C-alpha cells in the first residue's frame, strides 16, 4: 500500500506561509477573520431600526438625539475560515516513488499552511469517508494512502462546507470536462485553489519505443510504440488538459498552479506564493 | 470414463491453439501510467506479433486451457459410466376384430391382453422400454420403438382392435426386427400359436371360445326389370344351437322393417325385400359377443346400362349379335349408344364422342395390304390378358375372310401367323380418336365363330369392357380393405376426397379414382369439393373373425433372455456433464473478470 514518508523538517523549513485569504468576506465560525455576515467586530457595517431585544449598547444615541429615531449600529462579524483540503488518493498519485514523495511534500506544505491559518480545516479524500480534521500537519499522513481506484474528484458529491476555502490537490489525469469539474468544485465556496501535480515524464514524455502502457487505476492496457509522433500527440493532449484546467479556474475565480514532481519543496512554496495561493505569515 | 462422440475430442486442438496464441502474443515492457486515456487515441500497435519468448504461465492461460478442456470433453460426450441398460419388451398386439369380442362378464380379449402387458411392464421396472406393434396386413407401431413405459400405457388405453382377419406373420417379422438382439418378444393374441409355437417369443393367448352370430356377406340388389330392391345376407351362427336374433333395417331415420329370426347353427342366407329408391340402408342384428359383425351399410346399386347401336347388315352375323346381346342384362338399344357395331369399312369415319366402335368385315382401304382374303383354322395367338379375350379359346373356329392388313395399322389382339384377326387400330397423326375401336377382320356370314361357345363370351366381354369404362363406381358395396374404383364422367373441378365415418382423406385429382375401403367401414361418401358424388357401403364382413370358437387361453414359449437395451438418457443424466459445464463456465467467467479493461475493450 503506497504511503508517503514526508521529510517534515524540510517541509517545515520551506513553509513560513499560510493560505492566502480572499479579499471578499468569507463564512465560518467566530474567529479573527472578517465574515460576510453581521457580527461583533469593530468594523462598522450598517444601521437598522431598533427592535425590542437589541443590545442597548449598540443603540446610536447620537443619532437618536438628532432624529429621535432609535437606530442600532451593526458591525461586521469576525469568523475563523473553513478550509476543505481535498487530497486525491487514487493510485495515479503514486504511479512512481518520485511522484508519491513529491505528493507527500506538497500535501505537507499545504497542511502546514492550513495550520498556520487560524481555520477549521478538514481533509476530504472521498465522499464515502467522513472528512478528517486537520489539527497538526502530520495528520495528513493518516489519509495519504494512495490505493483508491478512483479519484475523489470524479465523484459527484463531495462533503464540502458552504463558503469554505477549498484546496484541491490532484494530477487531474482522468477524463473530465474542466469547466464542469471546476465549477462543481467551486460551487458555494469562498475560494477554490487547484494544485495539479504531475511527473515530468507525464507532462513531457520522451521516446521510449514499444511499451505496454498499464493504467494504474483501472488496469487498462495498451500496447503501443512511443515514438516522436506519439509524443507529439500526447503532449498536445496534455497541454490542452492543463490549459483547460487553468482557463476553467480563471473563469471560476479560482487559483491554479501546476507543480512538477521533483521540484525542491522550497521552490514549490515560492511558486504557490507567486500564484497567490500562499502568503507569508 | 467413456466418450459417446469421440470425434468431439478434436476440440482439444483448441488447447495448443490457446498456448500458441499466448506464446506468440507480443509482449512489450510494461510501463504503468496514470492517464492511459491520454494515449489511447494515438496509433495503436496490433496485438498480434511474432516474437517467441518463454511461455508465461498466467492465470488467463490456465483458465482458457481449462475452459477449452472442459468444453472439449462435453463435446466428446464424456461420461463417468456407460449408458444404462433397460429391458426392452416388444409386444405384438393382435389387432383383429375378434380381440374385441366380449364374454358374458363384458370382458374382452383386448382387456385381458392390456392387463397382461401392463403386468409384464410393471415386472420389468420403471426403466423398461416398451414397443407396441399392431398386427395387420400392414403392421404398424402403436408405441415406440423403445418408448417409456408411461407412453406405452397411454397408447394401450387407445388401442381398439378392429382389423379384418390377417396373418400375424408380418407383424411378428416387424416385431422381431424392432426387438433385435436386445429386446424380448411377446405376442398377444386370442388364438394359440401354430404348431411348434413361435421360437424365442412368449405367445400369450387371451381368447375365450364364444358363441357368435355375424353377417359374413351382404349384397343389395335392384332388379332392372321390375325395379324392386332386396338385401341378401349370409349369416353364420357359430354355436351348437339355434340362435334367436332380431334384424332391423333402417334408411336414415326411417325404420324400413324389423323381423325376429331363428338362425340354425352354421351358415344360412336371408333375403329381405326393399322398396326401390331408398338411400343407403343400415341392417343391424341384435348384440352378441362380437358387435363388429352385427351390422352392415348397403348402398343401392345403380347398374350401368350399356347402350348399343347395331348397324351391321342383315344376315347371320347381325342375327347372332342380337341373340348374344339378348342373353345379357344391363344392355339396351340406344342411339347414340355407348357401343356401336358396324361394318369395319366405316371405322375411318368420324363418330359421335363417347361411343366405342366395333367393326366387322373388310377394313378401310387405307389399312389394307395387297392380297386376297384368307380363312384360318388356327393356331390362333390370343392376347390372354386383354379383358376382351378372357375365357376365349377359339378352339374349332374357322376364321373366314381375313384380309391382309398393312403393317402397323392395327395392334393385334388375336392373330394367326402374321395375319391380324382382331385388333385395335393404331393411333396415327391422321387418327387421333381417344375412344377405343376394335376391328374384327372377319366375314361374319361365313365364319363358324358365331356358333361357337366363344361368341357369347366375346360379346359379353365386349359389353363388360364398355360397362367398366362408364362413369360411376365399379361396385356400390365393398368389404373393408378392398380396392374401391370410381370413374368420373369429367375432370374434377374441385379437390376430391372421401369421408367414411371419422376417416377422411384427400384423393388425387383425376377421372379414375382408386383407394382402399377404410376401416372400420360404414357409409363412404366420395366428395368433389362440398358436392357429394357417390355414396358407397363399406362393411366388415369377415367370416374368419366372426367365428370365435377357435379362441383359446394359454401361454406358449417364454421370453428370451437377452442383454437388454443400452439407453442414452442424454447428457443431463451424468454428473460429469454438469461438473464439466460448471468448470468450463466458471473458467470463462473468471477469466473475463480477470481480463484487464483494455483487453475487454479491444
Image (spheres, rainbow, N blue to C red):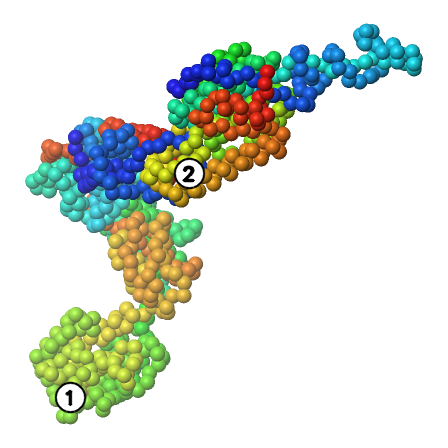
Residue that numbered label 2 is attached to: B39
Query: Alpha carbon of mark 1 to alpha carbon of mark 2: how far?
Result: 110 Å
Q: Is residue B523 visible?
A: no
Identify the residue at image location x=87%, y=10%: A61
SS at mark 2 in the image: helix
Same chain shared by disc 1 and disc 2: yes
What is the quadrant of residue A22 in the picture?
A: top right
Horizontal arrangement in the rendering, residue B210 relative to residue B194 (left or right): right
**Which SS class for mark 1?**
loop
Residue B142 rendering spot, x and y as whole percentages:
26, 42
Using the rendered view, name the quadrant where residue B575 is placed. Answer: top left
> Residue at horizontal 69%, vertical 17%?
A35
Residue B547 quadrant: top left
**Which residue, given by chain and number where applicable, does mark 1 sit on?**
B404
Front one among B244 and B459:
B459
Q: Nearer the viewer, residue B513 or B124?
A: B124
The local crowd at label 1, few if under 14, some if 14 to 19, many if 20 or more residues have their Cα within 10 Å, is: many
B176 or B63: nearer the eye?
Answer: B63
Please give the name of the residue rendered at 33% of the width and 32% of the height, measured from the top-left corner: B30
Amino acid at each position: 500500500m503506497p504511503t508517503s514518508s514526508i521529510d517534515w523538517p524540510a517541509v517545515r523549513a520551506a513553509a513560513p506561509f499560510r493560505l492566502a485569504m480572499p479579499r471578499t468576506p468569507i463564512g465560518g465560525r467566530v474567529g479573527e477573520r472578517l465574515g460576510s455576515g453581521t457580527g461583533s467586530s469593530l468594523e462598522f457595517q450598517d444601521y437598522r431600526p431598533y427592535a425590542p431585544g437589541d443590545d442597548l449598547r449598540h443603540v446610536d444615541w447620537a443619532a437618536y438625539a438628532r432624529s429621535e429615531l432609535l437606530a442600532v449600529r451593526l458591525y461586521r462579524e469576525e469568523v475563523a475560515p473553513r478550509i476543505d483540503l481535498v487530497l486525491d488518493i487514487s493510485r495515479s498519485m503514486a504511479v512512481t516513488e518520485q511522484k508519491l514523495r513529491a505528493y507527500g511534500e506538497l500535501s505537507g506544505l499545504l497542511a502546514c499552511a492550513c495550520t498556520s491559518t487560524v481555520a477549521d480545516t478538514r481533509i476530504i479524500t472521498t465522499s464515502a469517508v467522513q472528512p478528517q480534521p486537520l489539527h497538526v500537519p502530520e495528520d495528513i499522513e493518516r489519509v495519504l494512502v494512495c490505493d483508491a481506484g478512483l479519484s475523489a474528484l470524479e465523484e459527484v458529491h463531495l462533503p464540502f462546507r458552504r463558503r469554505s476555502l477549498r484546496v484541491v490537490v490532484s494530477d487531474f489525469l482522468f477524463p473530465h470536462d474542466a469547466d464542469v469539474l471546476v465549477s462543481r468544485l467551486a460551487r458555494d465556496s469562498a475560494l477554490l485553489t487547484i494544485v495539479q501535480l504531475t511527473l515530468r515524464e507525464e507532462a513531457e514524455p520522451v521516446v521510449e519505443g514499444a511499451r505496454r502502457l498499464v493504467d494504474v487505476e483501472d488496469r487498462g492496457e495498451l500496447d503501443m510504440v512511443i515514438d516522436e509522433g506519439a509524443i507529439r500527440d500526447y503532449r498536445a493532449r496534455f497541454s490542452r488538459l492543463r490549459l483547460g484546467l487553468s482557463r476553467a479556474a480563471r473563469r471560476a475565480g479560482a487559483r491554479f498552479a501546476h507543480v512538477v514532481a521533483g521540484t525542491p519543496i522550497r521552490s514549490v512554496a515560492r511558486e504557490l506564493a507567486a500564484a497567490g495561493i500562499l502568503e507569508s505569515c | 470414463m467413456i466418450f459417446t462422440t469421440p470425434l468431439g475430442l478434436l476440440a482439444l486442438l483448441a488447447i495448443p491453439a490457446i498456448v500458441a496464441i499466448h506464446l506468440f502474443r507480443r509482449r512489450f515492457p510494461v510501463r504503468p501510467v496514470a492517464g492511459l486515456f491520454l494515449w489511447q487515441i494515438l496509433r495503436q500497435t496490433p496485438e498480434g506479433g511474432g516474437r517467441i519468448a518463454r511461455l508465461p504461465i498466467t492465470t488467463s492461460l490456465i483458465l482458457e486451457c481449462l475452459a477449452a478442456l472442459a468444453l472439449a470433453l462435453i463435446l466428446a460426450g464424456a461420461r463417468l459410466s456407460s449408458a444404462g441398460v433397460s429391458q426392452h419388451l416388444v409386444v405384438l398386439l393382435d389387432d383383429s376384430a375378434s380381440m374385441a369380442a366380449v364374454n358374458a362378464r363384458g370382458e374382452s380379449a383386448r382387456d385381458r391382453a392390456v392387463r397382461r402387458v401392463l403386468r409384464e411392464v410393471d415386472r420389468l421396472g420403471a426403466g423398461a422400454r416398451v414397443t407396441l406393434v399392431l398386427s395387420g396386413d400392414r403392421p404398424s407401431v402403436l408405441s415406440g420403438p423403445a418408448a417409456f413405459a408411461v407412453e406405452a400405457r397411454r397408447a394401450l388405453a387407445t388401442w381398439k382392435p378392429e382389423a379384418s382377419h390377417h396373418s400375424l406373420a408380418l407383424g411378428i417379422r416387424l416385431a422381431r426386427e424392432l426387438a433385435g438382439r436386445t429386446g424380448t418378444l411377446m405376442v398377444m393374441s386370442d388364438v394359440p400359436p401354430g404348431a411348434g409355437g413361435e421360437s424365442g417369443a412368449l405367445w400369450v393367448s387371451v381368447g375365450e371360445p364364444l358363441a357368435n352370430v355375424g353377417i359374413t356377406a351382404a349384397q343389395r340388389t335392384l332388379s332392372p326389370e321390375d325395379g324392386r330392391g332386396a338385401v341378401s345376407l349370409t349369416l353364420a351362427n357359430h354355436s351348437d344351437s339355434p340362435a334367436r336374433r332380431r334384424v332391423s333395417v333402417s334408411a336414415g331415420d326411417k325404420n324400413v322393417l324389423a323381423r325376429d329370426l331363428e338362425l340354425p347353427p352354421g351358415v344360412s342366407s336371408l333375403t329381405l325385400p326393399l322398396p326401390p329408391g331408398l338411400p343407403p340402408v343400415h341392417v343391424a342384428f341384435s348384440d352378441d359377443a362380437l358387435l363388429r359383425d352385427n351390422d352392415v351399410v348397403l348402398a343401392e346399386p345403380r347398374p350401368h346400362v350399356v347402350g348399343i347401336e347395331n348397324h351391321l347388315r342383315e344376315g347371320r352375323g347381325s342375327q347372332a349379335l342380337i341373340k348374344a346381346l339378348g342373353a345379357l342384362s344391363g344392355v339396351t338399344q340406344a342411339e347414340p349408344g355407348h357401343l356401336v357395331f358396324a361394318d369395319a369399312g366405316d371405322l375411318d369415319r368420324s363418330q359421335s364422342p363417347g361411343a366405342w366402335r366395333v367393326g366387322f368385315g373388310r377394313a378401310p382401304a387405307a389399312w389394307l395390304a395387297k392380297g386376297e382374303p384368307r380363312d384360318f383354322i388356327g393356331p390362333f395367338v390370343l392376347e390372354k390378358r386383354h379383358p376382351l379375350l378372357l375365357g376365349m379359346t377359339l378352339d374349332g373356329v374357322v376364321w373366314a375372310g381375313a384380309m391382309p392388313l398393312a403393317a402397323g395399322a392395327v395392334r393385334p389382339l388375336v392373330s394367326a401367323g402374321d395375319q391380324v384377326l382382331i385388333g385395335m387400330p393404331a393411333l396415327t397423326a391422321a387418327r387421333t380418336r381417344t375412344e377405343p375401336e376394335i376391328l374384327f377382320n372377319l366375314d361374319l356370314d361365313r365364319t363358324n365363330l358365331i356358333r361357337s361357345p366363344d361368341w357369347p363370351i366375346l360379346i359379353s366381354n365386349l359389353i363388360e369392357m364398355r360397362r367398366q369404362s362408364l362413369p360411376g363406381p365399379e361396385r356400390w358395396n365393398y368389404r373393408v380393405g378392398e380396392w374401391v374404383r370410381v370413374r368420373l364422367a369429367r375432370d374434377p373441378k374441385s379437390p376430391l376426397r372421401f369421408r367414411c365415418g371419422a376417416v377422411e382423406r384427400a384423393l388425387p385429382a383425376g377421372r379414375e379414382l382408386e383407394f382402399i375401403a377404410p376401416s372400420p367401414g360404414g357409409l363412404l361418401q366420395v366428395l368433389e369439393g362440398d358436392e357429394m358424388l357417390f355414396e358407397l357401403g363399406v362393411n366388415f364382413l369377415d367370416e374368419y373373425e366372426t367365428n370365435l370358437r377357435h379362441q383359446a387361453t394359454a401361454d406358449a414359449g417364454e421370453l428370451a433372455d437377452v442383454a437388454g437395451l443400452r439407453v442414452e438418457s442424454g447428457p443431463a443424466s451424468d454428473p460429469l456433464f454438469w461438473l464439466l459445464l460448471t468448470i468450463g463456465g466458471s473458467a470463462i467467467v473468471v477469466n473475463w473478470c480477470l481480463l484487464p479493461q483494455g483487453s475487454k475493450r479491444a
